[in-house]
Each structure stands twice: as structure tokens, then as C-alpha cells.
Amino acid sequence: MKKYEIAKKKVLTSEITQISVYAPLVAAKAKAGQFIILRVDEEGERIPLTISSAENGLVTVIFQKIGGTTLALDELQEGDCLHDFVGPLGVPTHVEDLGRVAVLGGGLGCAIALPVARALYEAGNQVDLIGGFKTKDIVILEEEMGKACTDLHICTDDGTYGYHGFVTGKLEELIQSGVKFDHVFAIGPLLMMKFACKLTEKYNIPTTVSMNPIMIDGTGMCGCCRLTVDGEVKFACVDGPDFDGHKVDFDEVIARNNTYKEQEAKAKEKHLCRLGGGAMNG
């Protein structure tokens, strides 16, 4: 098998794809919470993706088609090779001796929550994994999540499957029923993590969030992934991606992440137009 070859590809939904890449050196050292940075080709941008699993020389990542690079990545098939695949990067998630924990995953964030929950569970903690999705049709990784925790709770915004409501609503329901959580991990959209932290702060439960801001080099040199934690500047790529959620300035991170929304949309439109033109001419 060739270096950075895509050994397996699986379509999870119309917008979400899972690939397993042959990268034995990365796989040998990868731990829960860490990520890789890849490039599709020599001219491509560098994008970070959290490691979903790593075994037998293969590193599995899951991505959503939201911009030009992820659309280009999705065009690759089994047997194709990536240009770069660097990692593992970031500080591994602390999983030992935490007690009873809740792991919240929102949408694609469930792909990141999965390895964290699995590591916590394998370390002997009691794990409630709460996965949230907009609707039943886009629920992903349910079987895998069920094997990575003590209790799995699926939530849908529209009530078509599982708990009707957000993951924060399910978490508060469990707390109010008498469940004593020693720690909470919130992983997913920034607003979900922000409101999860507001909830856990009310109940005085330590909370860890996984931050995925704009990132380029993954070494802390470019400064793009900076965020403010407890009044100090931190870099998600080297100081994180895990941080104390009660100390993160979420409003600042949300504003920074919105900086390139317009360019991202244009890149996606340009890529789709190129594909459409090729199809019409082909």
C-alpha cells in the first residue's frame, strides 16, 4: 500500500464522508483528541481533521463537504493518495480516573466525540454519550457510539428519533434526575459548546471543550488558531485542542471563525461550477 493511500471510503450521509488513510507512523502514535493536517494535492490548502480511529496502520477521519477543499477530498476514491498527511498533532485528551462523565457530540462533532468517549470508557470511566442531530435521517455512527460508552442517548432537534431536543436539554434532564456527573466533555458546533458550558457552570461540573478554530500550520507559528482562555492567548494546535470550557472566550472564537465564511462559500461555488462544467463538456 502506498504512502497516504485511501484504503477505505464510506459515505455516511450525502454531506459526510469517512476515509481511512494508510499512515502507519501516524497510526502508531495517535491518541484520542488528536488530529491530523492534510493536503489533497500540491496546490491545496492545509485542513485539520480529528482522528476518529487509528489501527492496523490506518488513520480514519470524517469530514463534511463544506468548502472547496473538502469537496476535492471527497472526489478521491479508494486507491488514490493524499499529498500530505501530518500528525498526530495536539495534546491527547485526559481520560484517566474521572468517574462518571458525559460526552456531548453535536452533528459532525459526534465523529470527534466518539474516540474521546471510547478512550474514557476503556480507561474505566462510566460514560454517558449524548449525540445530537437535526433529524433522524442524518444520524451517524450510532452503532460505533453504542459500543464506546455505558449509555448512549441520541437526540434530534425535530423529535424524529430519540430525545426530542438539544443535547444540553438531555444533559440537564439527566442531572435533574439525580445523575452526578464528575466531568463533561462538549464537542461540536461552537454555540452548542458555549451553551453546554453555561449549563455545566450552573451545576458546577468541570467541562472540557474541543476547539477547532481556523488553522494552517499546526505548530503554533502562524497564530491563526489563537483563542483567549482565562484571559490568556492560547493556540489550539499546540495548547489544545482541549480547553477548560468555563474559561474559553466563545464570542471571540465565533467572530474569528466567521471571518472567512464568504470566501469559503465562493470556493465551494467555484468548485461545484467546475464540476458542472466538466460534466456538461464531458
Image: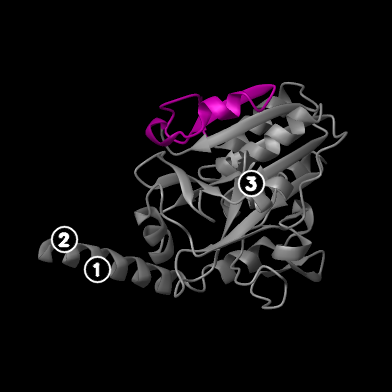
Q: Name the amino acid type tagged 3.
A: Ile
Distance between the alpha carbons at the discs numbered 3 and 2: 38 Å
* Residue behind mark 3: 187
The label nearer to you, 3 versus 2, is 2
The numbered dot on residue 103 is none
Pick whichever of labels 3 and 2 is earlier in the sequence. 3
Within-10-Å neighbours for mark 2: few <14, some 14–19, many 20+: few
Residue 196 magenta? no
259 shown above or below 83: below
Residue at the spot 62% in from the left edge and 41% down from the top edge? 53
Work out which quarter of the rendered image holds the C terminus and state it. bottom left
138 shown above or below 241: above
What span is in magenta? 136-165
Q: Seen in the image, is 174 located left or right of residue 205?
A: left
Residue nearer the viewer, 125 or 39:
39
Distance between the alpha carbons at the discs numbered 2 and 1: 9 Å
The numbered dot on residue 274 is 1
Does the rendering let one see residue 164? no
Q: Are marks 3 and 2 in contact (CB under 8 Å)?
A: no
Q: Are marks 2 and 1 in contact (CB under 8 Å)?
A: no
Within-10-Å neighbours for mark 1: few <14, some 14–19, many 20+: few
> Percent x, y for residue 272?
27, 63
Q: Name the amino acid type tagged 1.
A: Arg
Pick whichever of labels 1 and 3 is earlier in the sequence. 3
The numbered dot on residue 279 is 2
